[in-house]
Image (cartoon, grey):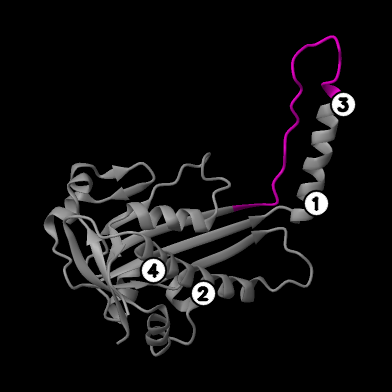
Amino acid sequence: MKTKTFTLIASVVLLASSCSKEVYNNKHYLAQHNLEGKTLAILPVEVYYTGNKPKNSDWYAEEQAISLQIQTALEQAYLLHAGEHKPGKHQFNIKLMDVNTVNKKLLQNMTDLRTAWKMPADSVGRMIDADIVFKLHMNKERYMSKNLAKSINTGAFFLESLLNTSDKGGDFVALPRVQAEDVGYEISLIDAHSGEVISSYVKDPEKDRSKKVRKINKTMVAKSVVFAANYR
């Protein structure tokens, strides 16, 4: 099996606190489990599009394509992070299963990867002989095209300028802005044997409204319990 060696952060800082702002780390779990040499797999990402569907668009195909992109992006985020950082103290070596290997094993047990989306993450992990898995979910709700949203917001900006040019002063008139879409993104590290959550991204509905998937992945890489050490 093609694997990449990883390390798991279990530093004093993590054990002293169950939550590091955006990322929750289960200190109770970490205190009771030795993850040395365990195998980690990034599962196919659950992706759903909702809302105002453009004409001639195939959301089913797009969902599957985005699923593969995000799955690979999380793996690459760990590899890039490893190239720029050194392992910290109190870390355990674990192995990351290549995403191509993950998907190939799953397709030996199911007709397509979407089948794994709705299955319990721990069950999917055991199916491919993984000890720990990353479960990801993304939902994109589309309201309008990005070009239309940009045009509306540009118009609001110029109208604000006209309304607030009075020499008489007064309160500033602020017009609301619109957005083309909302993206919800969830990511959790789960024990494939017990189903227990080891780490997860803690969402802030207000602050995370416009946060990109790439930035959330980067935050998870830096603050969750998984850190890449050696790989091949």
Residue 176 colored in magenta in the image:
yes
Query: Based on the displayed image, in which of its 4 quarters is residue 155 positioned?
Result: top right
Q: Which numbered disc flags the more N-terminal residue, 1 or 3?
A: 1
Residue under label 1:
148
Which is more N-terminal, label 2 or label 3? 2
Quarter of the figure with residue 4: bottom left
Query: Residue 131's spot in the image, x, y percent?
Result: 24, 72
Circle 2 Cα neighbour tier, 10 Å, few/some/many (<14 / 14–19 / ≥20): some
Q: Which residue is mark 3?
A: 162
**Magenta residue span:** 163-182
* Position in image of residue 188 (x %, y %): 36, 59
How would you rate the neighbour count of disc 1 (Cα within 10 Å): few for under 14, some for 14-19, many for 20 or more? some
* CB-based contact (under 8 Å), mark 2 and mark 4: no
**Which of the two labelled residues, at mark 2 and mark 4, occupies the earlier sequence position?**
2
Q: Amino acid at mark 3?
A: Leu
Secondary structure category for the residue under label 2: helix
Q: CA distance from mark 2 to mark 4?
A: 17 Å
Tell me: residue 166, above or below residue 40. above
Which SS class for mark 4?
A: helix
For label 2, the residue is: 68
Residue 229 vs 126, above or below: the answer is above
Q: Quadrant of the N terminus?
A: bottom left
What type is the residue that disc 4 sits on? Leu
| Number of other residues with Cα within 10 Å of mark 4, as a class: few under 14, some 14 to 19, many 20 or more | some
On residue 79, which mark appears?
Answer: 4
Which sits in the foreground, 172 or 47?
Answer: 172
| Circle nearer the viewer, 4 or 3 | 4
